[in-house]
Image (cartoon, helix red, strand yellow):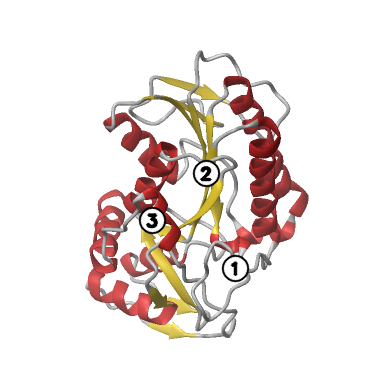
């Protein structure tokens, strides 16, 4: 398979490129960066949020569309810009897929759902809490349209809280594992803002979901939760990070955000239809991440 990975120099991108290359696929990368990650055959510096045409790179069999902006605070400040990046950018990538009749995978988010106490299944109520979630929900509708009207096969992956080596957060409150992990390694207080329970998935498991979904496309693209199904409160997460990091960072129980509702997945559909099964436990995943932070630091916290 000759696969195009967009957003290839972000967090998920290099891991996805590596997994596809190791599996024997030829990988083309695209991002706004001048150079691509290791393992690519071709890199294209391209911004899918613009109207600039994507250059001819030869045959494309599949597209893993990971490009976009997941910063919730930036989306609240500038909804038009986030829609341009996440929604219009997806439509432009779909046009590339249409020209090549390529399988199309969209990286979406847990934030398309209305948070609730029970586990969230793919058919749960879609009521995003912010413009970022709405931009991704709109992108999902474009992918569905491309399947129903243009016959494009593919998949929509709703990632829950993905973390792991390569993730650095410099602003905002999205990416709780990275934020708390960076602060723990730096010896700074870890501030717990809510009672919310989250579903934490290590990046290698998330990427395994991408590879499986590209191998099992549907028409139109079906949505799948990529997560663990295991709830973890933010306070318990902070306590676990402190134990794994063997640090003395203070845990500040602020709880100023109260409980906005849980974000925990039901992954039954991904298990049955894709053969997806998370394999990295939380403590092992956090240990890998903390080790990476210490090896590559310092990082802003």
Residue 53 in percent (x, y) is at 68, 21
The answer to whether mark 2 and mark 3 are in CB contact below 8 A is no
The answer to whether mark 1 and mark 2 are in CB contact below 8 A is no
Instruction: Say if residue 119 shows up in the picture.
Output: yes
Is disc 1 placed on a helix, strand or loop?
Answer: loop
On-image quarter of the C terminus: bottom left
Residue under the point 29% across and 67% down: 282
Q: Residues within 10 Å of mark 2 (few under 14, many from 20)?
A: many
On-image quarter of the N terminus: top left
Q: CA distance from mark 3 to mark 1?
A: 18 Å
| Residue pointed to by mark 1 | 124
The answer to whether mark 3 and mark 1 are in CB contact below 8 A is no
Residue under the point 52% across and 22% down: 44
Drawn side of residue 53 relative to residue 118, left or right: right
Residue under the point 40% across and 37% down: 215
Residue 298 in percent (x, y) is at 35, 54
Q: Nearer the viewer, residue 80 or 120?
A: 120
Q: Which comes before the other along the chain, label 3 or label 1?
A: 1
Q: Please, is residue 224 above or below residue 191 in the view?
A: above
Callout in the foreground (3, 1): 3
Drawn side of residue 47 relative to residue 211, left or right: right
| Residue pointed to by mark 3 | 272
| Residue pointed to by mark 2 | 155
Is disc 2 placed on a helix, strand or loop?
Answer: strand
Is disc 3 placed on a helix, strand or loop?
Answer: helix
Q: Which comes before the other along the chain, label 2 or label 3?
A: 2
Q: Which comes before the other along the chain, label 1 or label 2?
A: 1
Residue under the point 50% across and 84% down: 195
């Amino acid at each position: 398979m000759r696969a195009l990975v967009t957003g290839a120099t972000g967090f998920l991108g290099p891991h996805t490129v590596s997994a596809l290359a190791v599996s024997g696929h030829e990988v083309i990368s695209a991002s706004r960066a001048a150079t691509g990650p290791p393992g690519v055959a071709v890199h294209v510096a391209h911004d899918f949020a613009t109207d600039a045409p994507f250059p001819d790179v030869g045959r494309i069999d599949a597209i893993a569309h990971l490009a976009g902006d997941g910063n919730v605070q930036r989306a609240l400040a500038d909804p038009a810009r986030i829609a341009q990046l996440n929604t219009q950018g997806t439509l432009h990538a779909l046009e590339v897929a249409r020209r090549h009749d390529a399988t199309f995978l969209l990286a979406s988010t847990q934030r398309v759902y209305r948070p609730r106490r029970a586990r969230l299944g793919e058919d749960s109520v879609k009521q995003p809490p912010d413009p970022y979630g709405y931009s991704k929900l709109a992108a999902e509708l474009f992918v569905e349209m491309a399947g129903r009207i243009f016959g494009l096969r593919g998949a929509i992956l709703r990632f829950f809280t993905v973390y792991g080596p390569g993730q650095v957060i410099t602003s905002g409150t999205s990416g709780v594992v990275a934020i708390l992990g960076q602060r723990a390694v730096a010896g700074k207080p870890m501030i717990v803002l809510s009672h919310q329970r989250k579903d934490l998935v290590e990046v290698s498991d998330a990427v395994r979901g991408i590879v499986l979904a590209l191998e099992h496309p549907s028409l139109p693209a079906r949505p799948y939760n990529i997560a663990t199904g295991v709830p973890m409160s933010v306070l318990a997460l902070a306590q676990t990070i402190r134990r794994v990091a063997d640090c003395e960072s203070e845990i500040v129980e602020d709880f100023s955000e109260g409980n906005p509702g849980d974000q925990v997945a039901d992954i039954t559909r991904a298990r049955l239809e894709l053969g997806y099964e998370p394999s990295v436990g939380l403590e092992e995943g956090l240990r890998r991440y903390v080790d990476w932070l210490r090896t590559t630091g310092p990082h802003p916290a």
